[in-house]
Image (cartoon, grey):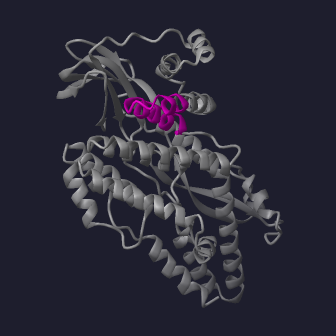
């Protein structure tokens, strides 16, 4: 017992350490100074490899136009995630004694997929379409890996990445790969639509009609045209703008304290006790029945919708409204809700183990029991790790424009559909018969 206490207290100090403050990252981002946010993150890197930090660094570097450095950070996050699938046994055991914060963090599936979205954009902004296509294929391989790993894979984020791949393959003139990607996007959106509330964008159906015609797939062309209708005409000597508008922040995880009653009649050492305890969440018992109130800390997540929930883009020649292609908030909440029972089970197993240590120590010496109880409370911290700078929602605007330079006039819409703010982006070059891909971010 005495040997266990220093271990618990040292671990509590380890899991409480942090290299950077999130507020110091978002303040310069929101004030239009991504370079300052990037410099801050570089100066406050954690001592050990950390996936959330690499995600934050990669995204901030992207907004600061450090595209190679951004991709390098995302690559490091991916490498760490792969390594952690064969995670350290010692850290896994440690997490059962202290906190889930000691579990190897591999990033969620949707976080890993979205890192490919930003890597694709990094290549595009460097004029390296071939590199962007390689990244699309890497994203496709990751989706296939997730599908093979779990037959009940939720496809969160997969539709968006497949749609992006279709756009890029189409931009490169690789019509067959574009067609396959759009078909996958249609399937993935349909699989996830009920849970995340994002329907397949009409543009994917139009793309299937257009490409089936180009490839001479007569049966598929007729079927898709009946299903989706005739796509809008693309005028000669026009190019195409594909703009991704990123709004707000994904909701962060926070810590929630829960109390679970241990009753005087309970056999705490029974292997079936923890599942029984899980069923007592939120229940109230008389004081006369209570032996102990077990306090645990678990993560929680709540809606954090931004002020701007839509966008219209206008030029002198055309106007289009964005359609939602990725609801990161709903994906994050649904992903967490699926994980919560497992998190709660691990947390209660750990908490009951700490309670048994306390009960044994208390029988030997009340002061020792108090110290063990204190150590258990100190080490009980919820694992709130996540990629916090991700946008809340991503919209796509796809419009035909004549070749030349254009000023994009943005109208940002609130929940009532009214314009809350306007901004302009000048000198956007559109090439004839080519696709131009951009992204744009607001934080309100």
Q: Quadrant of residue 262?
A: bottom right
Q: Residue at x 38, y 18 (%)?
A: 416
- Of residues 422 and 439, the one drawn nearer to the viewer in this rendering: 439
Query: Residue 146, can we see it?
Result: yes
Q: Is residue 291 above or below residue 75?
A: below
> Is 123 placed left or right of 274 in the picture?
left
Query: Residue 381, can we see it?
Result: no
Read off the magenta span.
157-181
- Of residues 412 and 364, the one drawn nearer to the viewer in this rendering: 412
Q: Position of residue 401 (x, y in %)?
A: 27, 17
Q: Residue at x 29, y 48 (%)?
A: 62
Give the dominant element type of the magenta stretch: helix, strand or loop. Answer: helix
> Is 69 placed left or right of 231 in the picture?
left
Q: Residue 84: within the magenta?
A: no
Q: Quadrant of residue 371?
A: bottom right
Q: Residue at x 67, y 56 (%)?
A: 342
Q: Position of residue 433 (x, y in %)?
A: 31, 21
**Which quarter of the image is occupied by the C terminus?**
top left
Q: Position of residue 272 (x, y in %)?
A: 82, 63
């Amino acid at each position: 017992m005495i040997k266990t206490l220093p271990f618990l207290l040292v671990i509590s100090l380890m899991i409480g350490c942090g290299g950077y403050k999130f507020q110091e990252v978002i303040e310069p981002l929101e004030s239009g100074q991504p370079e300052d946010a990037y410099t801050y993150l570089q100066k406050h890197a954690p001592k050990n490899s950390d996936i959330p930090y690499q995600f934050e660094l990669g995204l901030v570097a992207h907004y600061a136009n450090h595209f190679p450095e951004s991709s390098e950070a995302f690559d490091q996050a991916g490498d760490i995630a792969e390594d952690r699938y064969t995670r350290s046994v010692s850290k896994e055991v440690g997490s059962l004694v202290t906190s889930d914060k000691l579990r190897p963090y591999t990033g969620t599936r949707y976080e890993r997929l979205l890192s490919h979205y930003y890597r694709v954009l990094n290549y595009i902004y460097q004029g390296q379409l071939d590199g962007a296509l390689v990244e699309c294929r890497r994203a496709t391989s990751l989706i296939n890996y997730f599908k093979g790993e779990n037959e009940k894979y939720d496809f969160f984020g997969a539709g968006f990445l497949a749609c992006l791949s279709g756009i890029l393959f189409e931009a490169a003139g690789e019509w067959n790969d574009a067609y396959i990607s759009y078909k996958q996007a249609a399937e993935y959106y349909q699989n996830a639509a009920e849970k995340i509330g994002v329907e397949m964008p009409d543009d994917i159906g139009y793309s299937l009609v257009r490409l089936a015609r180009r490839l001479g797939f007569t049966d598929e062309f007729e079927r898709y045209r009946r299903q989706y209708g005739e796509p809008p005409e693309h005028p000669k000597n026009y190019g195409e703008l594909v703009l991704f508008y990123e709004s707000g922040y994904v909701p962060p995880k926070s810590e929630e304290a829960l109390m679970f009653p241990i009753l005087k009649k309970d056999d705490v050492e029974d292997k079936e006790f923890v599942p029984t305890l899980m069923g007592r969440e939120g229940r109230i018992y008389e004081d006369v029945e209570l032996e102990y109130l077990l306090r645990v800390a678990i993560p929680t997540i709540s809606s954090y919708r931004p002020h701007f929930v839509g966008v219209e883009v206008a030029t002198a020649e055309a106007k289009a409204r964005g359609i939602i292609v990725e609801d990161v908030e709903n994906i994050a909440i649904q992903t967490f809700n699926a994980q919560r029972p497992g998190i709660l089970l691990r947390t209660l197993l750990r908490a009951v183990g700490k309670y048994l240590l306390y009960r044994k120590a208390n029988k030997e010496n009340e002061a020792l029991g108090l110290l063990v109880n204190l150590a258990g409370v100190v080490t009980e911290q919820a694992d709130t790790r996540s990629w916090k700078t991700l946008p809340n929602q991503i919209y796509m605007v796809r419009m035909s424009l004549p070749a030349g330079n254009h000023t994009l006039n943005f109208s940002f819409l609130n929940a009532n559909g009214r314009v809350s703010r306007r901004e302009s982006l000048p000198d956007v070059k559109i090439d004839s018969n080519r696709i131009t891909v951009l992204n744009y971010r607001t934080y309100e």
